[in-house]
Amino acid sequence: MTRFLLWLLGGVVLGGIIHIIVILTLPRLADETVLTRIAAFDAANRMVILPQVEAGQPNPLSLDPDLIYGLCVIDLASGPAYLSGVLPDAFWSVALYNEAGIVIYSTTNRDGIGQILELGIFNAAQTRLLAQQQLDVAEGLLVVESASNKLFAVVKLIPPHQAMRQRFAQELSEASCGTRG
């Protein structure tokens, strides 16, 4: 009986180890990642307004049809990135995602920012240069450090009325995003 329990315990432990290994490696083996899904929008270093989701139509990105979404893909390997613009006087939020689709930073206009968004995104090496004052940045710039070079930013606007949707989308499209130079 003791031998049977040891074999049973060994089988459970081995099964648990195999399960953990499979769970941790499967995402790395996937052909379709978050970055490959958003690559179709051609948003490298520029703000792209995502098309409005229509009721009853496919919604592969699970977007809320009442929101306006701006997307920008950033690669910090070519230098620091900046996200700036004057956004409408209504609720908005911005989030930075790493290549795995995990939020590394987010803020809203409710954080005392108001309508003006000025965000500087740096990797660790660029942050060291910034600390040594070898990079010039504007006063009031929100500084965000990223562990990875490949990121994407999503800006969400909530128009109070559908009649304002077009104007809000236009204002968001005028925001600048990406590396300078």
Image (spheres, helix red, strand yellow):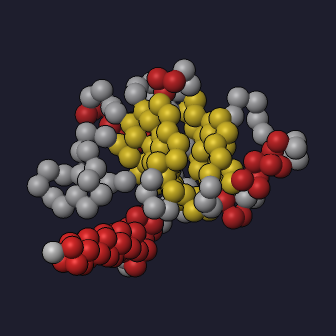
Residue at image point 39% right, 36% down: 157
106 horizontally vs 135: left or right: left
Q: How many marks?
A: 0
**Residue farthest to the left?**
56
Where does the image place residue 118, in percent across and percent down from the top left? Answer: 63, 36
Residue at image point 73% right, 58% down: 79
Q: Nearer the viewer, residue 9 or 46?
A: 9
Where does the image place residue 152, in percent across and percent down from the top left? Answer: 51, 55
Q: Is residue 66 visible?
A: yes
113 to 71, vertically: above or below: above
Residue at image point 33% right, 31% down: 159
Where does the image place residue 77, in percent across and percent down from the top left? Answer: 69, 64
6 to 144, vertically: above or below: below
Where does the image place residue 121, in percent across and percent down from the top left? Answer: 65, 48
Q: Is residue 114 visible?
A: no
The answer to which image quadrant residue 26 occupies is bottom left
**Residue farthest to the top?**
112
Residue at image point 24% right, 45% down: 65
State the quadrant of the N terminus.
bottom left
State the quadrant of the C terminus.
bottom right
**Residue farthest to the front?**
1
